[in-house]
Image: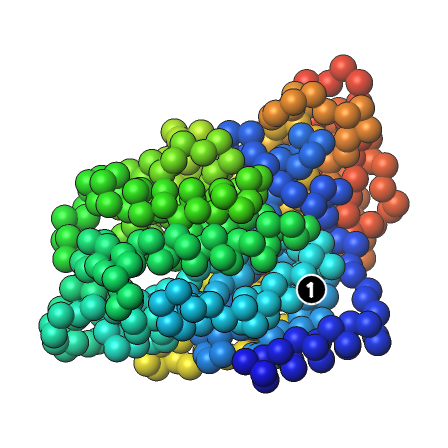
Amino acid sequence: MTVVSSIARCLGLAVLMFGLTPSAVATPAATELGHAGRWLTDDQGRVITLHGVNLVYKNPPYFPAAGGFGEDDAQFLADNGFNAVRLGFAWNAVEPQPGVYDDDYIQQIQQTQRLLARYNIYTLIDSHQDAFNESVGASWSGFPQWATFADGFPLRPDPGFPLVYFASPAQNQTWANFWRDHLAPDGIGLHEHYAAMWAHVARFFADEPYLLGYDLINEPWPGWDWPTCFPQGCPGFERDVLAPFEANAMNAIRRVDSRHLLFYEPSVTNDFGTPDWMPNPTGDPEAGMSFHDYCFGPVDTCVSNGLDRAGAEGVVGVVTEFGATTDQARLIRLADRLDENLASWMFWSHPQNQTPDHHQEPPTGPNLMNPALVRPYPTAIAGTPQQWHYDSTTGTFTLEYSAHPADRPLPRDARTEVYLPQSNYPDGYQVESQGAEVVSAPDARLLQLGTSPGQDTVQVTVTRR
């Protein structure tokens, strides 16, 4: 921990010595976001869209700065129009022994969140795991060994992540014990430890600017009950097991942070297109649903399933993982579909994978994002979105929105803002608008529009010059 503290001091000294040059790209004025139904909103009531990346470092000591993430990388994200990061931590590192917390480790995660905030990038703090612990077939130990109870069940067959979920008896028995709130070595239940851990972590972030909120658990696996989740989803598991577990964490966080959004996750089986039954665990009005899109086949139901379920619960839905590929054509198709659904999203880059045949690369620069995902989008809409579309072949971007607010009455000077990457418009752009006036400088990276008085609908078309 002495080494960790030294790294933190060096990072802080570097910031003081060299100063900051935050990008002015794609940022609402507010440092905190709420929601109006399915829409993220800022303090003016504008609808906010997030384009982001995942930043999860799975190699010890499990924090991004140790893998090389720093000032240049935050600048890189901002310069390419990314305004959000899902920042993962390992429970294994937060609580290396039952009830013993490593605050130096949490402060390393906090340092990265503060760095991102200086570039006006929102952070979603994420408790990340993939197949629990290395002793039961995971590619890394996101959850601690002391919380892993396989009861002597064999690890094999162990085909590696993610197939280990389906194949390994030890993997499934570990999750079964976890959901039964197995006692930790100190006699306290694992659910109680998990909730207390979250409260301890949230204390470090409750007052930080540009905090989107907390993602309670990455991709929870139902254990032995997984065969019942195909093809119709896991209604019993999500309602009777997963929701109470996540409710414990939500209630614990609320005791130290009363305002930031709490993002709960459904079963990982929904990542592949099964129906989503996940309720809002506590009915908290400031809640959201974090869900993933790894659907395969010609019909992708992941995005619509997640957004429909979030809408039914009256919470905001955010696609917090998709991609995990370098196939440019596929990424463009995925981004187009997310645009069709007016979705906020956070990309999972292929270099972040850590599997038996792929060791994770440091989370820096181009390892975080793919050029296919640098595209125009409305970062803030002074009204309610109706549609937007980007044609990557011609460079034409269209946007249509209602001038009526999604939440509360808008200030008279509220602006709609559209990020237009220089890489997509190397010689500038032209704007045609109906119902709004361009108030930004010609060829500004952030196109700003003021709605004309008396308009119901605004239509905007941007073309390459």
- Classify 359 as above or below 28: below
The residue nearer to you, when weighing 230 against 425, is 230
- Classify 240 as above or below 395: above
Say which element carries label 1.
helix
Question: What residue would you read off at disc 1?
Answer: 115
x and y percentages locating residue 12 in the rendered image: 73, 73
Report if residue 214 is visible in the image: yes
- Classify 187 as above or below 428: below
Q: Residue at x 44, y 47 (%)?
A: 252
Q: Residue at x 69, y 64 (%)?
A: 115
Q: Amino acid at mark 1?
A: Leu
Q: Residue at x 38, y 29 (%)?
A: 312
Task: From the viewer's perspective, tell me whether residue 224 is left or right of residue 179.
Answer: left
x and y percentages locating residue 427 in the rendered image: 80, 57
Q: Residue furthest bottom?
A: 3
Task: From the viewer's perspective, tell me whether residue 158 is left or right of residue 313.
Answer: left
Q: Residue at x 80, y 18 (%)?
A: 453
x and y percentages locating residue 463 in the rendered image: 72, 45
Report if residue 371 is visible in the image: no
Q: Quadrant of residue 257?
A: top right
Task: From the viewer's perspective, tell me whether residue 289 is left or right of residue 344.
Answer: left
x and y percentages locating residue 408 in the rendered image: 65, 22
